Image (cartoon, rainbow, N blue to C red):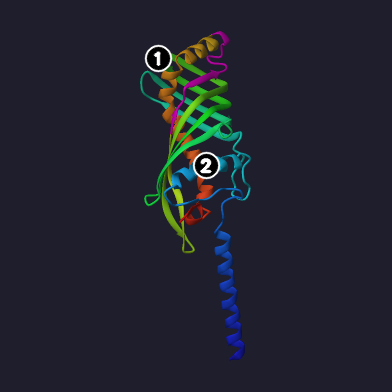
Amino acid sequence: MFRVSTAASLLLLIVAIAQELNVTAAEQDLPEGFPKCKRDANFDKCLVDAVNVAIQLLKNGNKEFGIPPLEPLAVKKLVIDAGNAPINLRQALKNIKVHDLISTSKILRYKTDLDKHLIICESRTDRIEMIGDYEMSGRILLLPITGHGKSNVTLLNTKIEHRLIGEPFEKDGVKYMRLKDYRVNFEPKRVYLNFENLFNDKTLSDGMNRFLNENWETVFNELKVGYAKSFGLIFRELSNKLFEKVPFDTIFQS
């Protein structure tokens, strides 16, 4: 009986230790150097300063959390559709490098409702340059457009509204939050567009690119919803690499 009881006790002890190790491994702290904010009257203001520091710390990525380098940010593919007149267009951008998105960004304000797991943020980014390959077909202002080759889409002085919509979940009895939606709205002061090899003819390509840049506001306003959806998915995936690993009360201190 003594041997059985001892064996059982050892088994229970091993299970308890294993459970404790699993909980410890599951609960991670924020990356080193990340400021933390207490949920008090100054919480939203604290977040502005804290996140401005945090995004620069993440510029080169973070292996512990599986976050790739963010500058430049590598994006395999963006598919942008605009199906309403005056623009009926499909863009497929591939093998994209997004430059300057982090280094020229500044958080301006936060508005949070953590009881509803809602975070609204406004930022300004001096320059977002997207360089990659493209395939495009459709019509712009009744003009047919088609082509494939290298592209550059550059947004200047862009105000961005970020709306993070989260949902709580528990892991080993600890509360976490994941983002179920990340909505983005871009409002640039200027957009420059360049698509090489339109129509497989340099003269026609140069003329269409000139037309696109002279009418950039009309063109981008039709395309920006597609860009916003694509970047919302990217931002959600990157953000959840932190949210799903760090407990809610560690990110947002009570």
Which quadrant holds residue 130?
top right
Residue 183 drawn at (x, y percent): 42, 38
The alpha-carbon separation of the residues under discs 2 and 1 comes to 44 Å
The dot on residue 49 is: 2
Q: Mark 1 sits on what residue?
A: 141
The residue sitting at 36% across, 23% down in the picture is 84
Instruction: Name the foreground residue: 149 vs 221.
Output: 221
Q: Which residues fall within the magenta stretch?
A: 185-203
Name the N-terminal-most of marks 2 and 1: 2
Residue 238 seen: no
Q: Nearer the viewer, residue 193 or 149?
A: 193
Secondary structure beneath disc 2? helix
Which residue type carries mark 2? Answer: Asp
Circle 1: residue type: Leu
239 up-or-down from 200: above or below: below
Foreground: 125 or 138? 125
The residue most toward the front is 41
Question: Where residue 56 is drawn, which disc sits there?
Answer: none
| Residue that appears at 53% across and 27% down | 126
* 244 shown above or below 184: below
Q: Secondary structure at mark 1?
A: loop
